[in-house]
Image (tube, grey):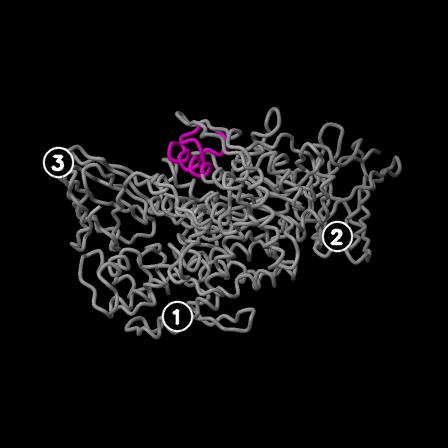
Amino acid sequence: MVIWHLTSATPRFPFHVSAGQNVNLQFGTWPIEEGQRTWIDVRIVHPDSSVNTEQVEGTWNFNRDANSYWFINVGPFADGDRVEYRLHGSSSAGPCAAGTFAFQVDPKIHLAILWHQHQPLYKDLQAKRPQGSYRFPWVRLHAIRDYYAMADLLEIYPQVHLTINLTPVLLWQLEDYAERGATDRALELTLTPASRLSAAQREEFLATFFEADWHTQIFPWPRYRALFEQRQDGRSFTIQDLTDLQMWFNLSWFGPEFQEGPVKLPNGEVASALSFIAQGSGYRSDQIAQMVDEQLKIMRNVVAVHRRLQDRGQIEVSTTPFYHPILPLLADTDQATIDRDGGTHPTRFHRPEDATAQVHQAVTFYQERFGHPPVGMWPAEGAVGQSVVSLCAKAGLHWIATDRGVLERSGQYGYNVQDPNVLCLAYRAEDEAGRGVAVFFRDTVLSDKIGFHYQRYVDPQQAAMDFLRELKERFAWQVNDPPNRIVSIILDGENAWGAYPQQARPFLHALYTALAGDPEIRTVTFREYLEGNPTRRVPAHPLSALPRVYDLFQASWIDENSSGPGNDLGTWIGEAEENQAWDLLRETRDWLDQVKTTPQRRLHAFDSLYAAEGSDWFWWFGDDQASDSDADFDDLFRRHLGNVYRAADRRPPVTLRRSIVPHTLIWTFARPIASIRSEDRLTVRTNCPGRLLWRTDPDEPWRTDEMIPAGGVMAAVHRFGVTLGPFAPSVQWVEFRFRCAHPGCRGTDPCCRAQMQRVEVLGIHGGVRYGNGVRYEH
């Protein structure tokens, strides 16, 4: 009698076993005989080294040709068990045996999630006073909605381990608010009693205080929705209306945790917006000041909550070069791959010393706040290359991460990222001197589904289940070496949530609950995966044992819109506006050399220079990305460059006064425009997807354009828009209707009214009138 196991006809299912699973063992015997018997001796070694043994009888299944086929079901087993078994058989011809066979009861895949938290420097570093020195309020508003809560949410899911990337420029700005009294324009408008707002302040206030997602932040609150409709209908606002709007704009940005009850903070303070929300309307100025105090409490505790979770070992906090620059472009713009039609390189910018400074400043800043150097880095925009490997290795970093599209273009022939056994690895990248770092490559598909897709689900539980299902079908059930395989999910940890119901809290709770309870998936931090964690049975993966990735391609997480296929750096370089910005940056940097200024002699000048090197300004230049605020980002970029000269007691050159971005006027429901000039471009911007029907003549048919997404999950708040114009001199007006296609629309929401809108088109000497009738000359 002969007995066999683990062939194509006699498998073990599942082959890789996780906790709680029953295991089906199939085996065969030869020849077919009367009186045959089969069994297995099982030995189970538990994680505490205790041992159990048992004998399990086999069950005959069927005969085929000269063979008999049998099966045995065993299990379930506990996580960490090692199961050994030996097959036995007996017949009239005598006994036989096969084995020993063994399997380890473990998860089938490691999962590393990274939430990236970042805002560029919105502050004018040469402002005379801290009050109002910030152009935009996004650092403050995302702090009260996302930066604290995204970490604190993990407290109730101790089995979920993940990484949160906090950029130094973001943390510096949080400290500026909380410790140095800085404010932004919106906060100054919030704190100014409504009765004291000037006409210009009132218009700015009404134009910007509906900057929130309509369906998730405005429409759910009856008073805020009523104010939105009041603005859309062109009705006047009383002083009480304005005061209520000051309150509700801010309340809509608090995280649900603070909206629904008190939250005890790491420093012992308690923060809450519940009493203000319960009041609903009729607010006083002193209550608004109290509400702002609640915001400052939260901002003071952002670093503390992350440090507490990291010290506990549940999260890893990683970092980014200080002002979020594209490191390969700082090192050498001539090395950038530009494959967009008409794209060209600017005059060479070659400042590897600036790239080094941005990395080292980040490491130092991190150590001062967290008590030890960072282990890993998400290079800004996932932009990597061989030059980045050397920079990070020299700085003492152990890992970096980027997108799978970079792996696909690396090496002599590229890597097959469709193969999960290729993608789901940590790799070793080395520079010419043999210095190395580990590199993780994110799965683009699942990362983007969290960012762009799951918010459309009515049931957040179903969204979480679909995430786990795809994670298993594409990766966990396909890899051939589970202990050494990891899936990386990396995306923006702030802007995505505004499009989710209740700021994505139901989805995140569903996701974390599912991950914590699923024995086939083990969440890890990147550091934990490399160093190992015996208490969670995560094996170590030292750098020397990782497979090498050769010639790490110079690219980012994104393939530039309208460019050739494949990830690249074209989003930040190659178009006329982008290259003009690089030229201004290069001229300013060269001027510092000409006047023999160093960071040691003129620290503030270099702070402004490094801020201008940030990726965010270049993201919005050109036609490949769009936002409501392109002109504002242009102004901030040139302001930072001008501050280089001001910090050195020099007057900025006249070239920095000229705008890079062409003149485009933005029409929104909150800030309708009554007229434009014929040479202007008009962008109709909404918070919802849909179609724009428009015409410029009553005798012509309506034209229809799909609203184009503006920004993205790694960049800005979700917006949709269509740009029209410039217009022929004969055009006197443009009429349009917006037809909403948001899946959450009820047909009665303000965005669904499909009202006719008209904007007058004036001659070249005309001005611009906004919807309230106030005329602004350009």
Q: Which mark is residue 308?
A: none
Q: Are marks 2 and 1 in contact (CB under 8 Å)?
A: no
- Real-space Cα separation, disc 2 to disc 1, in angstroms: 53 Å
Q: x%, y% of residue 68?
A: 75, 34
Q: Are marks 3 and 2 in contact (CB under 8 Å)?
A: no
Residue corresponding to mark 1: 291
Q: Amino acid at mark 3?
A: Asp
Indicate which disc, 1 or 3, sits on the residue closer to the N terminus: 1
Q: Is residue 588 left or right of residue 400?
A: left
Residue corresponding to mark 3: 697
Q: Is residue 104 left or right of residue 549?
A: right
- Real-space Cα separation, disc 3 to disc 2, in angstroms: 76 Å
Query: Which one is in front, 704 or 348?
Result: 348
Q: Can residue 372 be seen here? A: yes
Q: Amino acid at mark 1?
A: Met
Q: Can residue 13 be seen here? A: no
Tell me the mark number nearer the camera, choosing from 1 and 3. 1
Identify the residue shown where x is 43% and y is 27%: 344
Q: Which quadrant is the N terminus positioned in?
A: top right
Query: Which one is in front, 114 or 366?
Result: 366
Q: x%, y% of residue 159?
A: 62, 58
Q: Can residue 628 be found in the magenta stretch?
A: no
- Real-space Cα separation, disc 1 to disc 3, in angstroms: 50 Å
Identify the residue shown where x is 41% and y is 45%: 637
Secondary structure at badge 3 equals loop
